[in-house]
């Protein structure tokens, strides 16, 4: 009996010892770990940054972990911050802009303020605003979600449209063009996922509004751009121009396969589109259509993310120095990731670099990067608030009713009520 | 004393990892607030439940799944079990394995396969179009009704074999002479099933119904994987478990409230199991 007991005790001790050994091994001093979610995009850009930093600082060891999806990273981050157990967290984490305030405000003190050590005026102001809380900025802004309308120029040509016909138009005009394209080529205009109100957010932001007022209260019922965006969204369905899809793979599949004629999305999709080299020359890019409403411009944003340093990190100084040296200063680096990953960074000085002036044969020889950086400067800045996920969920709950021709004011009321309920 | 010594490690672990969290979650369910800023809120969370449209939708969906899916699955499992218990049937072992196999398949793997089968241009739509049963592809995950249908199909596919195994085991314990006597008396096959098999399997049917009820009330994996965690379209597939997950890990963390929703599941499981026991007992005494 005693022997069994002591053997059990030894095994338990061994198990505990190996757990603590692993924890220690994971946090060796000097290593800077980074969480990213897209090996082809932000992962590749971060690895390039790490290589550049290593050339300056041979001692540095930046470990880029691109094994988890964005949803998983959010869940891991939220769980560990809630549990107050920061051992497993990285030193640097990538967070999407429209969700950043939730982390900053509900986990105060968990992230390191960076505005003391890095000059934030070097970045696009709307990116800095997204990560500013209580007068301090907490991120090194990374990719812009500057949006554009990517379209199959061959389909539009068949329907009798030129690149000029698509530039600086309204969404209503796009519905007309899409109807024409469908009649002449048989291709639907867009594919949309009813669980993802991204396009609606993009439309709304083009008029400088978001789901919340400056004081954090809900801005739904009297939000004219949101109402107009929902109406416009429904128009695509009324005109029968939408292929419904579910999930990211189906969404990207519909336009990369040539099934639909266009996609309005953030610039970060460039890499996905260009992955099909045989479609080179068949694509064009136009500015984001605007809402047919006062104050809406032909520029908006969808997605986009920034680097945050965790306050629990043992290697804060290395991490900040790394971000400062490469991400906040190295203009050449931004040229490299622009060409390599289609990453439009938000360091303003990078826009003067050579790559930004280059044309792209894939998009019919257009000066795409110059265009995107021009649009970037026009994006209306909005405050993303802390409850975006809740309102998104409330909107997706009402979308089927709206698309069935339901009353938009009633839907806005329902969205408001549900969001109000969840914001307690 | 020696006996206690043997079971002490298990008791300590059980207390630490089960009893303590259960009690703690009950305490949590009375807390309100965001993130870590929690304070005692009395019955505020229960009041919030009654006004929360998403919770009510999740509750409705969970019950739809439960009321539609559990009876279909139990009846199917029973029919399969009786058919595969027939000693004259060839390849019985093969059929049994084939029907049981889904429930040992990895959840993620089968969800992914189902999702691709029911995609817009997936094999299901293609087959239905080729058979001229439909003209345009059904948007399985874009339509609130069909999304529910796919989830019901998926869980039925996965768990029917599991229940069948219980029935098979029970059937093998029934004395064959009972059936022989019935056959000699000229009782037809249907009546033998209705008046002999089902009554004799009643305890097992009760058991499988209770565990299926518990399983369905905790439905999470299929919905999460099919709808990328959204419970869409239009919250038509959101279940109580998925809502708990969203409240904790997707939305502004609301631990207290999600603990309250968890306890709703506990209470529902208790009530439904009790009802099932009472129904079964009444029949026995009648």
Image: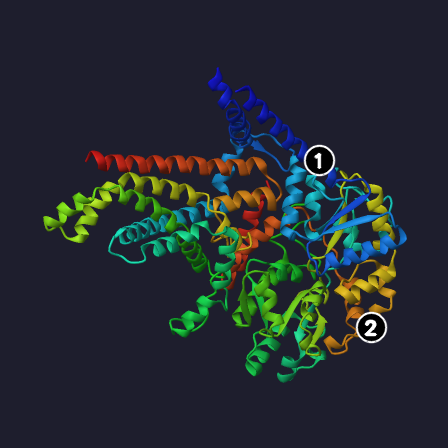
* Residue B252 placement: quadrant: top right
Q: Position of residue A109 (x, y in %)?
A: 75, 37
Q: Earlier in the sequence, mark 1 or mark 2?
A: 1
The C terminus of chain B sits in image quarter? top left
Circle 1 Cα neighbour tier, 10 Å, few/some/many (<14 / 14–19 / ≥20): few
Whether label 1 touches label 2, CB < 8 Å: no
* Residue A353 placement: quadrant: bottom right
Residue at the limit of the structure toward the top, as seen here? B1
Q: Where B80 falls versus A134 (above or below)?
A: below
Circle 2 Cα neighbour tier, 10 Å, few/some/many (<14 / 14–19 / ≥20): some
Q: Position of residue B71 (x, y in %)?
A: 33, 49
Find numbered disc 1 in the image and state the secondary structure of the residue it sits on: helix
Q: Where A330 falls versus A356 (above or below)?
A: above
User: What residue is drawn where x is 80% and y is 44%?
Assistant: A31
Task: Mark 1 vs mark 2: tell me if same chain.
Answer: yes
The count of marks equals 2
Along the line of sight, which residue is nearer the eye, B28 or A295? B28
Q: Is residue A214 visible?
A: no
In this picture, residue A197 sits left or right of residue A268: left
Which is in the foreground here, disc 1 or disc 2? 1
Along the line of sight, which residue is nearer the eye, B43 or A409? B43
User: What residue is drawn where x is 81% and y is 40%?
Assistant: A29
For label 1, the residue is: A21
Q: Position of residue A282 (x, y in %)?
A: 68, 78
Q: Where B164 falls versus A267 (above or below)?
A: above
* Residue B212 placement: quadrant: top left
Report the disc number at residue B118. Answer: none
Find numbered disc 2 in the image and state the secondary structure of the residue it sits on: loop
Give the CA separation, mark 1 to mark 2: 51 Å
For label 2, the residue is: A358
In this picture, residue B215 sits left or right of residue A153: left
């Amino acid at each position: 009996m005693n022997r069994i007991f002591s053997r059990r005790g030894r095994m338990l001790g061994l198990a505990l010892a190996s757990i603590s050994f692993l924890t220690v091994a994971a946090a060796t001093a000097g290593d800077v770990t980074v969480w990213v979610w897209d090996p082809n995009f932000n992962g590749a850009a971060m690895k390039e940054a790490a290589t550049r930093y290593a050339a300056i600082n041979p001692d540095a060891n930046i470990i880029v972990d691109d094994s988890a999806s964005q949803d998983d990273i959010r869940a891991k981050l939220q769980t560990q911050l809630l549990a107050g157990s920061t051992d497993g967290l990285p030193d640097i984490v990538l967070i999407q802009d429209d969700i950043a305030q939730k982390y900053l405000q509900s986990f105060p003190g968990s992230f390191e303020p960076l505005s003391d050590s890095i000059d934030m005026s070097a970045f696009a102001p709307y990116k800095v605003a997204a990560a500013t809380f209580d007068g301090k900025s907490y991120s090194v802004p990374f990719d812009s979600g500057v949006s554009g309308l990517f379209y199959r120029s061959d389909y539009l040509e068949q329907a009798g449209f030129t690149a000029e016909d698509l530039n600086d138009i309204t969404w209503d005009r796009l519905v007309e063009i899409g109807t024409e394209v469908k009649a002449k080529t048989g291709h639907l205009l867009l594919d949309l996922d009813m669980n993802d109100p991204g396009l609606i957010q993009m439309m709304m932001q083009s008029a400088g509004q978001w789901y919340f007022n400056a004081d954090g209260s809900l801005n739904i019922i009297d939000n004219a751009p949101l109402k107009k965006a929902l109406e416009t969204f429904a128009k695509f369905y009324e005109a029968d121009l939408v292929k419904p899809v579910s999930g990211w793979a189906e969404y990207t599949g519909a336009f990369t396969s040539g099934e639909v004629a266009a996609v309005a999305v953030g610039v970060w999709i460039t890499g996905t589109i260009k992955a099909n080299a045989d479609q080179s020359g068949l694509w064009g890019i136009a500015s984001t259509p605007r809402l047919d409403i006062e104050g809406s411009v032909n520029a908006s944003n969808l997605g986009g993310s920034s680097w945050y340093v965790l306050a629990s990190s043992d290697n804060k100084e290395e991490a900040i120095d790394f971000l400062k040296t490469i991400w906040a200063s190295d203009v050449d680096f931004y040229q490299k990731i622009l060409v390599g990953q289609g990453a439009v960074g938000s360091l303003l000085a990078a826009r003067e670099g050579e790559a930004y002036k280059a044309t792209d044969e894939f998009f019919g020889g257009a000066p795409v990067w110059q265009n995107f950086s021009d649009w970037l400067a026009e994006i209306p800045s909005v405050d993303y608030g802390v409850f975006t996920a809740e309102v998104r969920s409330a909107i997706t709950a009402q979308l089927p009713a709206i698309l069935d021709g339901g009353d938009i004011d009633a839907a806005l009321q329902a969205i408001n009520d549900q969001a109000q309920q969840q914001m307690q | 004393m020696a006996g206690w010594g043997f079971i002490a490690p298990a008791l300590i672990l059980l207390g630490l990892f089960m009893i303590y969290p259960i009690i703690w979650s009950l305490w949590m369910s009375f807390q309100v607030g965001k993130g870590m800023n929690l304070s005692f809120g009395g019955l505020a969370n229960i009041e919030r439940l009654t006004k929360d449209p998403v919770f009510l939708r999740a509750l409705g969906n969970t019950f739809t799944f439960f009321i539609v899916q559990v009876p279909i699955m139990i009846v199917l499992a029973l029919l399969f079990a009786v058919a595969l218990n027939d000693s004259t049937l060839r390849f019985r072992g093969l059929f049994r394995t084939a029907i049981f196999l889904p429930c040992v398949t990895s959840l993620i793997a089968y969800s992914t396969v189902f999702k691709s089968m029911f995609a817009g241009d997936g094999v299901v739509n293609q087959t239905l179009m080729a058979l001229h049963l439909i003209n345009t592809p059904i948007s399985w995950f874009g339509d609130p009704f069909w999304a529910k249908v796919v989830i019901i199909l998926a869980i039925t596919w996965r768990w029917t074999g599991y229940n069948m195994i219980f029935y098979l085991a029970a059937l093998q314990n029934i004395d064959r002479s009972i059936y022989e006597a019935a056959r000699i008396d000229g009782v037809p096959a249907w009546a033998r099933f209705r008046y002999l098999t089902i009554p004799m399997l009643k305890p097992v049917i009760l058991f499988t119904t209770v565990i299926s009820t518990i399983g369905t009330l905790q439905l999470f994996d299929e919905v999460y994987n099919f709808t990328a965690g959204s419970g869409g379209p239009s919250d038509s597939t959101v279940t109580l478990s998925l809502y708990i997950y969203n409240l904790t890990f997707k939305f502004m963390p609301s631990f207290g409230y999600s603990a309250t929703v968890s306890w709703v599941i506990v209470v529902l499981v208790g009530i439904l199991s009790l009802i099932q026991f009472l129904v079964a007992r009444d029949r026995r005494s009648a």
